[in-house]
Image (cartoon, rainbow, N blue to C red):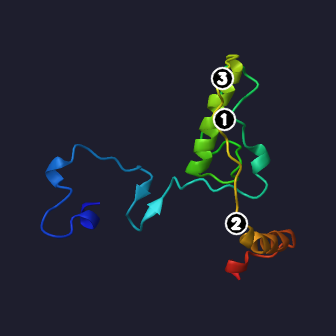
Amino acid sequence: MSRALNRGSKPILRDDELVSWHLDPGITWEPAISNATPLMVNTADSYRHRPTADTAISNFFIGGDHVRTNIDLATMEGANESGRRVANAILDAAGSNAARVAVHPLWELPLLDPFKQTDRDRYRAGLPHIMDV
C-alpha cells in the first residue's frame, strides 16, 4: 500500500507507523505465487444447497456470503443481504413489532439479458462459455 500511496515528497504511510500485519498462511511465493485458500466461487446449480439465514433451530441464524440471498454468488453484497435477513429473522423469532430491515431484490441491467440467455443455452448444450472458446 505504501508503494501505491507514497507518491511525491510527503509519505502517507510510513514503516515506523506499522503496528502489525498478517497474511493468510495459505499464500506462498516459492516456487511460484500460490493460494491454498482461494475464494469460494459457486458452481452451477449450487444455489439450492445454500443455507437460508433462518434455520429449523429457533435461535440459530446464519449470515455470510455463502447464505441463500437474491444474489447467486458469494459477494459482500450477498453477505450484507444475509445480515439483513438474519436481523429480520431474529426480530421475527423474538416476536418483535420493530420495523424490519429492507431486503432489496437484485436489479439486473436488462441490456444483458440476451447475453445471459446465450450463456444458459450454451451451458445446457454442454458448450464452453463464449469467452473460453
* Spatial separation of the CA atoms under disc 2 and disc 1: 24 Å
Q: What secondary structure is marked by label 2?
A: loop
Of residues 26 and 55, the one nearer the viewer is: 55
Question: Is 21 rendered above or below residue 107?
Answer: above
- For mark 1, what is the residue? 85
Q: Please state which amino acid type lies under the numbered disc 1.
A: Arg
Nearer to me, 31 or 101: 101
Measured in 3D between alpha carbons, the distance from the residue under mark 3 to the one under mark 2, in whole angstroms, is 33 Å
**Does the residue at mark 3 contact the one at mark 2 (Cβ under 8 Å)?**
no
Q: Is residue 44 left or right of residue 86?
A: right
Q: Earlier in the sequence, mark 3 or mark 1?
A: 1
The mark nearer the N terminus, 3 or 2, is 3
**What residue is shown with label 2?**
109
In the image, which is nearer the foreground, mark 2 or mark 1?
2
Locate residue 97, reporting x and y percent: 68, 19
Work out whether residue 115 or residue 74 is closer to the camera in this orientation and state it.
Answer: 115
Q: x, y (%) of residue 91?
A: 66, 23
Task: Give the residue type at disc 3.
Answer: Leu
Q: Position of residue 35 (x, y in %)?
A: 48, 58
Q: 118 or 36, which is in the foreground?
A: 118
Q: Quickly name the residue at label 3.
A: 91
The answer to whether residue 60 is visible is no
Q: CA distance from mark 3 to mark 1?
A: 10 Å
Q: Quadrant of residue 90?
A: top right
